[in-house]
Amino acid sequence: LIESALEKAENGVFNLAPGHIDTIRKMKELKNKSHKREPEIKRRPPDVNLPTDVIYSIGMMMQHRKYGYKCVIYGWDYECRMSQAWITQMGVDRLQDGSKQPFYNVLVEDGSERYAAQINLEQLEDQIEPCPHPDVGRYFQSFNGTSYIPNDQLRIRYPNY
């Protein structure tokens, strides 16, 4: 659609102000850049000295130790990547290892998404049921009875999930 509008405007099929043509060109450029962006690939390299290793995997069913919600992991960071204001507001600095521990992106059974510290999560081992979050299908291809199997896009981003 962007290419078509730009071509018609440049060929005089319809008149646009010069500023509008520039805007369409910029939109086309942004569109092309967004398609070329490669996903960040996260691996667990054995030679990196991190304060705490990432011990949980993509697709694992978890429970929050403090709040009790059940969730499934769909991403992780080696340490908290939120702002200092968020870290302070959420009390992360009061946790053992604070923000210098792995943090996990989780889909929660109530339909929300959260960012949880490793120390606050524990693996579900009994009475595991699929997570009813509406976005589960966006990240996973199936549930095997104990955990979720990542889809191709998630496997590319987390090759040794």
Image: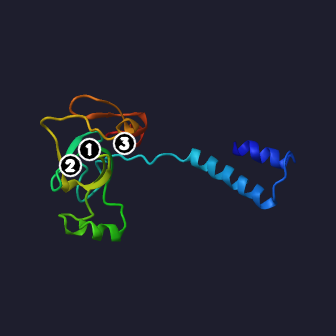
Q: Please name which of the two marks, 1 or 3, marks the residue nearer to the observer.
A: 1
Three-letter amino acid code of the residue under disc 3? Tyr
Mark 3, secondary structure of its residue: loop
Label placed on residue 158: 3
Residues under numbered marks 1 and 2 in contact, where contact means CB atoms less than 8 Å apart? yes
Three-letter amino acid code of the residue under disc 1? Glu
In the image, residue 73 lies at what x, y percent? 29, 44
Sequence-wise first label, 1 or 3: 1
Give the quarter of the image for residue 144: top left
Residue at the image position 24 percent from the left and 65 percent from the top: 92
- Disc 1 to disc 2, C-alpha distance: 7 Å
The residue tagged 2 is 69
In the image, residue 109 lies at what x, y percent? 26, 44
Label placed on residue 109: 1
Residue at the image position 22 percent from the left and 29 percent from the top: 145
Give the quarter of the image for residue 70: top left
> Pointer 1: residues within 10 angstroms few (<14), some, or many (20+)?
some
Q: Is residue 30 left or right of residue 95?
A: right
Label placed on residue 32: none
- Disc 2 to disc 3, C-alpha distance: 24 Å
